[in-house]
Amino acid sequence: MSPVVPVLSPHAPPARTARLALGAMVSLYFFSFFLRASVPGTIFNELQIDLALTAAQVTGLSSAFFYVYAPMQFVAGVCADRFGGVRTLLSGALVMTIGAAWFPQSDSVVACYASRALTGFGASFLYLSIVKEIDVLFGPIRFPTVLGTVLGFGYAGGIAAMLPFERVVALTGWRWALRGAAIALAVVWVVAFIVLSRIGPKSGSPVRLSWKPLWRVFVHGPSRPLFLVGLINYPAYFVMQAGIGKKFLQDHVGLSSASGALFTTIMMGISASMMLSAGPLLRLTRHRRKPHLYVASSLILIASSLLLAGVLMRARGVWFLFCYAMLATSTASAPAGNALMKELHGREVVGAAIAVFNGMAYIGVALLTQVIGLVLDGFSSAARISDRAVEYPPAAYATIFAILSCLSVVSLTATHFIRETHGYEPRA
C-alpha cells in the first residue's frame, strides 16, 4: 500500500513561510478576541463611575460593537473572496487598531460608542479572512487542525481580557491599560503587514458582491429553528462571560474585583477547552448534531435556573462558579451548530450559511446585552452608590436570570424542530 500524501493547495507556500504568515494572522486575532471580551465586562464599574454612565449605557458599549460586528459577518466572507484574505485582514485590523486607540481617549458617550463601533467593524473581517487564507496555506487535510490553533489563540486573547487585564487595570487604571493594549496591537499590525506583504499568500478572485446566497439561507425553512437556537444559546453564555458576570459577583456575592475576574477567567478557560474537544465529542455521537444542541440548551436552562435560585437563597460563590462552568460548557455545541447550518444548505452557499448563523449569534449578544442594561437601570432607585461602584439589588439579577431561563426554554423547544443531518449534506 502506498503512503497517504497530504493534499495541499496548489498555491501553498513553503512550510516555514506558511508558519510565519499564520503567526502574523493569529496574533491579530488574539487582539480581536481581547477587545470584544474586555469591554465592558472586566471594567464595568470603572466605566460606569469614571464616565458617569447608566447601566444601559455601559452594556451599550458591547452592543455598539456587536451591532456592527454581526451584520458585517454577512459581507466579510465575500470581501475576502473578492479581494483576498490578506488584504481584508490587514485592512480590518488597521480599522480595529484605530478604534482600540480611540476608545480610551473618549470622554463622551457618543465618542465611546463610535470608537467601539469602529473596533467592531474592523474586527469583523479578521476571522473569515484567516479562514480563507489558511485553506490556501495549509490545504484541506490540515485545515481543521490549523483552525483549532487559530481558535486557541483567540480564546487566549479572551483569557487575557479577564484576570490579567483586571490586574493591569488595578495598577494603571482602565485608560492606560487599554492604551497599552492599543500600542501592542499597533506593533503587531506593523509586523503582520511586513510579514504578509512580503511572504503572505495572495488570493482573490473577481467575485461580485451578491445578496442571493444570503437570501437563500434566510428563506430556507429548515434553518429557522436553528436561527432561534443561535440567537439564544451563545448570547446567554457571552453576556455572563464578558458582560455582567464579574459585576454580578461583585454586587451580589461580595467578591473582590480580582476574585470576580478569576471566575470569568475559569469560565473562558472551560469554553476554550470545550471548543478544542468538540471534534471528539461529535465522533462520540456518530456525527449526530442535535444531541449537542439539546445538551447545550439544557445546560443553559439548568444554569440559569440555578443562578436564579442562588440569588434567592443568597448562595455562596462556589454555587455561582458551578453555574458559570455549566454556561461555558454549553459552548461545545458551536461546531455542531455550524456543521448543521452547512449541511442543511449544501456546499454552494456554505459561506453564507455559516455567516448568517454566526451573525445571528452576535445579534443576539447585542440585543440581550442591551436588555440586561435596561433591567439594571429599572432597579437603579434601589441601587447602592459609592465612589467605586453602583451596586444593584438582588431583584435586578433575579429578573435577568429569569429572562435567561425563559429564553433557554424557547431554545430547547426550537431544538426539537431542527432536522438531523448525521453529517450529510443535501443532494444536488
Image: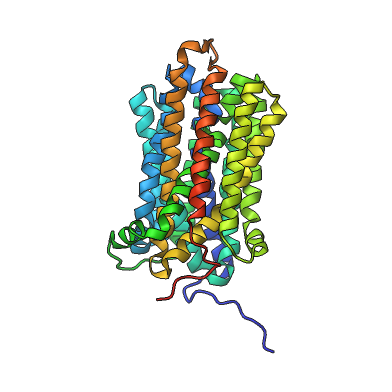
Query: Residue shown at 58%/68% (left/top)?
Result: 142
Q: Nearer the viewer, residue 197 or 343?
A: 343
Q: Is residue 360 above or below residue 3?
A: above
Query: Residue shown at 30%/58% (left/top)?
Result: 215
Q: Quadrant of residue 105?
A: top left
Q: Nearer the viewer, residue 106 or 237?
A: 237
Point out the image quarter for the N terminus: bottom right
Report if residue 170 is visible in the image. Answer: yes
Q: Nearer the viewer, residue 68 or 331?
A: 331
Residue 240 location (% of width, % of height): 55, 34
Q: Is residue 426 above or below residue 116?
A: below
Residue 16 location (% of width, % of height): 58, 65
Q: Nearer the viewer, residue 204 or 342?
A: 342
Residue 370 location (% of width, % of height): 42, 31
Q: Is residue 175 above or below residue 214?
A: above
Report if residue 38 is visible in the image. Answer: no
